[in-house]
Image (tube, grey):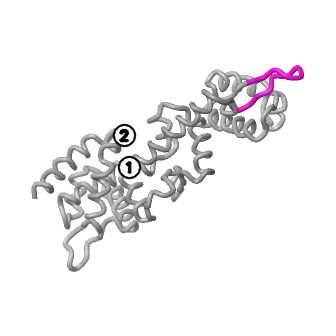
């Protein structure tokens, strides 16, 4: 079974048990319209992962969300949510699968806790014209323009363009293409998106080439989140930026 389908089934089971504690396998299978053997397979795995627990009652194994336990389990659940919250605080704009990857957790498990944090008003999610929802701390102070910029900084080619324009104001199209070594249609696609998001200014009569719309804000974000973004990859890009940043500081 494809992984995202598997995670979807697990998440449906978690949500169902959360809203209807004490359900037994055949009832879960009936409600979700899935084979009983499938449900029993997932219930066994999820219980091993401490996501759920079973209690024998009236001849049935009845299932509950593990966080309903008191003491140690509550502390563990709270600790996991603190980890997720702290990761989003330091890395605004992360999407679900990246959070799961960085914390070495299952997607369905992270999604369950994110829904709780969102319901409690601790985090917010935004989905634009892409497959991903991106998560932010609710009272982070980021406006829409900030969030658009953060999303761009998490994408390799747009980030490379921005770093190049930091070092080369009024850059010509051909110079950018030569630096990135990509096709003209691909470069045009990314440049147009950055222009529409007001991150770069296109060439005009008084401007010989492309330049950053707000260099000050971009530098602020790059400096603030460089360490955390560096951990996600793009090492060559950050080495390039670090060299530029040192020159800026030296004046």
Residue at the right extreme, as displayed: 58
Spot occupied by residue 223 in the image (x, y as percentages of width and height): 27, 52
Dot 1 falls on a residue whose secondary structure is loop
Label 2, on which residue?
Answer: 232
Label 1, on which residue?
Answer: 154
Q: Going by the image, does 59 lie left or right of 169?
A: right
The dot on residue 68 is none
Residue 161: quarter of image: bottom left
Q: Going by the image, does 29 lie left or right of 131?
A: right
**Residue count near mark 2 (Cα–Cα under 10 Å), binned few <14, some 14–19, many ≥20:** few
- Report the residue at 72% width, 35% height from top: 13
Q: Nearer the viewer, residue 44 or 131?
A: 44
- Report the residue at 20% width, 64% height from top: 171
Spot occupied by residue 10 in the image (x, y as percentages of width and height): 67, 33
Dot 2 falls on a residue whose secondary structure is loop
Say whether marks 2 and 1 touch (CB < 8 Å): yes
Residue 20: quarter of image: top right
- Image quarter (top left, top right, bottom left or bottom right) of the N terminus: top right
Counting residues from the start of the chain, the first of labels 2 and 1 encountered is: 1
- Above or below, 198 against 235 in this view is below
Where does the magenta region start and end?
54-65
């Amino acid at each position: 079974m494809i992984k995202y389908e598997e995670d979807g089934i697990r998440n449906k089971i978690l949500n169902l048990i959360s809203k209807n504690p004490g359900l037994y396998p055949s009832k879960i299978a009936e409600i979700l319209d899935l084979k009983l053997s499938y449900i029993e397979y997932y219930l066994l795995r999820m219980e091993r992962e401490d996501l759920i627990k079973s209690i024998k009652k009236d001849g049935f194994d009845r299932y509950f969300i593990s966080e309903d336990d008191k003491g140690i389990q509550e502390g563990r659940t709270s600790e996991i949510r603190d980890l997720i919250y702290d990761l989003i605080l330091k890395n605004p704009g992360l999407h679900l699968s990246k959070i799961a990857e960085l914390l070495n957790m299952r997607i369905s498990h992270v999604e369950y806790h994110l829904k709780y944090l969102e319901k409690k008003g601790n985090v917010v999610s935004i989905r634009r014209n892409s497959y991903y929802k991106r998560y932010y701390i609710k009272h982070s102070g980021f406006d829409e323009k900030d969030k658009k910029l953060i999303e761009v900084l998490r994408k390799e080619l747009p980030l490379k363009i921005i770093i190049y324009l930091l070092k080369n104001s009024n850059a010509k199209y051909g110079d950018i293409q030569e630096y990135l070594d990509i096709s003209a249609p691909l470069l045009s696609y990314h440049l147009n998106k950055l222009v529409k998001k007001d991150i770069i200014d296109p060439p005009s009569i008084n401007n010989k080439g492309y330049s950053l719309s707000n260099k000050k804000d971009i530098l602020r974000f790059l400096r603030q989140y460089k360490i955390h973004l560096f951990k996600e990859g793009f090492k060559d890009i950050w080495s390039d930026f670090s060299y530029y940043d040192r020159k800026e500081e030296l004046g």
